[in-house]
Image (cartoon, helix red, strand yellow):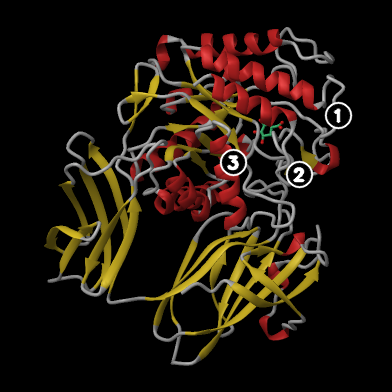
Amino acid sequence: MKLDGIWDFYFAKGKNINDFQIENSAYDEFAVVPGCFDVTIKHRFQRGLAVYRRMVCASGMQKLVIGAIGLRARVFWDKKELGICPVPFCTEEFKFDAGNDGEHELVIAIDNIIDNGVDSLWREYYDFYAYGGIYRSVTIEELKDVEITFCKITTKELESRTMDVAVELEGDFAGKKIAFTVDGKTVLEADAQKSSSVSFALPGAALWDTENPNLHTLEVKVADTVKTVSFGIRQITCKDGKMLLNGKVFKIFGLNRHDCHPQHGYAVPETIVLDDIQAIKAQGFNCIRGSHYPQSQIVLDICDKVGMLVWNESLGWQNKVESLNSPGFQKLFLRQTDALVKNSVNHPCIIMWGFLNETFSDDPGAYPFMKELAERVRSIDTSRPLTYASNRTVDDLCMDLTDIMSFNTYPAWYAIPGSDPNQQEFDRWAVEKSFSIIKEFASQECFNKRPVLISEIGAEALPGDHSGLRWSEDYQADLIDCVLDLIQKDDILQGVFLWMYCDSKTYSNPTGQVRARGYNNKGLVDEYRRPKLSWKVAGKRLKQGK
Ligand code: ADA
């Protein structure tokens, strides 16, 4: 049962969740769930404690799932604390006895106070705004005698459409049967076990790709417990420096996308997400990088349906080595890594996993935790390649941990070696130079021919500026056109993710970055999705390249 809707609400400016005392709650407003409270007219950009409450009819053992919150939350049922949500963008589950039949009180107390400690997963220097609220849906469901805690379906062999399914059970499954049904037809039945791994073929079943995003439905049933999973039959592999989708080499023409909107923060409604993804596809792009946090089920469901590839990554931004080596940070990071992979593993749109955007991967101290993260992801899913976006280029020391080498580079915006940081007119040379440095580094034998991606590249553009100089729409359009042209012609680079789809809220000047209007203005469309010149130029170039 979805608990989304209008909840009771109050806000206490400057307070945090440790100040919260449930006996002293005084609800004097309403708030929408999912929603961010600090985009509302009354509380815009305020930081403090926000308390959400609603009544729920439920009894007996229940599972409450909170899709995502920001920045942290405490959760209460009938005034008793069920637990915490310590990581933004991370799905959390609470299993508990809801008591007798009747109405019960569910309270989620949240704060959006930025913690700048070494263990924090969201510090003030991040280049995206720390909105507060319940970002994603809240649901509750009755816990049956048997619970299907995990179900993963992957394509084992494409030709014969052979699928592997891994299932984990909890509860009273002994002596019961487990049945697997695909698109309404039972394909297999076996004795239920705590962990089971089965394979079956679906001869002739339609494949999933970007042109024909065919989806199928798997139903796993044990006694009266049923889990329904939507899946696609498709394979992602890497060979001889190339990524292949269903055995065919493909190029990535991608966009980085912040899942945010000025009036919704990180609780972007389905209608806006669908509009974004369909517009991105119509323009000729085939992939989005979910920068820089796990993507919502809304985004992933839409990308599955529309046929848009996705790079899904955990929350992080230029995290420092002292954090990477702190047990508190590691614990939270592993918690979100588990949730990221487990909760989205069945989406055919996801073609790679990522973590730790632009960390200090040129420092040997970063290596051990990055290795642990890579191992953790691979312990849950080996059916997709692994990458991280590095801005350390030739000094990077951790690339051997990846399957795909990804580089963030900003030639002709931030300086690269040999370029003039004060250059006002676009200079193609800087982009060519940057790509050649990356390709030379990646071609080293030790990397054993891994696919190479440009994971970020772009320039700021303020709508309406047509001077042709830096910050103008024309300058940005020239850069984007040049990048796409070079990528279309390049035999080594697998593809590019332009930075970025839409202008996104950040801070005016947190760390000396220049962020006009308090926005990262490198969008090809602005924050309300109004196109800049580069959007049209990119569309033209991508359609020409077909
Ligand atoms: C980095 C970072 C992005 C954004 C970008 C920029 O590469 O990964 O989040 O901050 O730079 O606009 O400078």
Looking at the image, residue 76 sits to the left or right of residue 384; the answer is right
Looking at the image, residue 258 sits to the left or right of residue 471; the answer is left
State the residue in front, 543 or 448. 543
Query: Marks 3 and 1: CB-CB under 8 Å?
Result: no
Residue that badge 3 annotates = 279
- Dot 3 falls on a residue whose secondary structure is helix
Q: Which mark is residue 465?
A: 1
**Where residue 412 appears, x then y in whole percent?**
74, 17
Which badge, 3 or 1, comes first in the chain's sequence?
A: 3
Which badge, 2 or 1, comes first in the chain's sequence?
A: 1
**Where residue 212 appears, x then y in whole percent?**
37, 39
Query: Marks 2 and 1: CB-CB under 8 Å?
Result: no
Q: Give the amino acid at mark 1.
A: Asp
Nearer the observer: mark 2 or 1; the answer is: 1
Measured in 3D between alpha carbons, the distance from the residue under mark 3 to the one under mark 1, in whole angstroms, is 24 Å
- Dot 1 falls on a residue whose secondary structure is loop
Quadrant field for ligand 1: top right
Q: Is residue 457 visible?
A: no
Ligand 1 closer than 8 Å to label 2 CB: yes
Measured in 3D between alpha carbons, the distance from the residue under mark 2 to the one under mark 1, in whole angstroms, is 21 Å
Which badge, 3 or 2, comes first in the chain's sequence?
A: 3
Q: Give the amino acid at mark 2.
A: Thr
Q: Give the amino acid at mark 3.
A: Ala
Residue that badge 2 annotates = 506
| Placement of 524 over or under 432, stated as above or below | below
- Image quadrant where residue 150 sits: bottom left
Circle 1: is it few (<14), some (14-19), or many (20+) Cα within 10 Å?
A: some
State the residue in front, 173 or 368. 173
Counting every numbered tag in the picture gives 3
Q: Is residue 522 visible?
A: yes
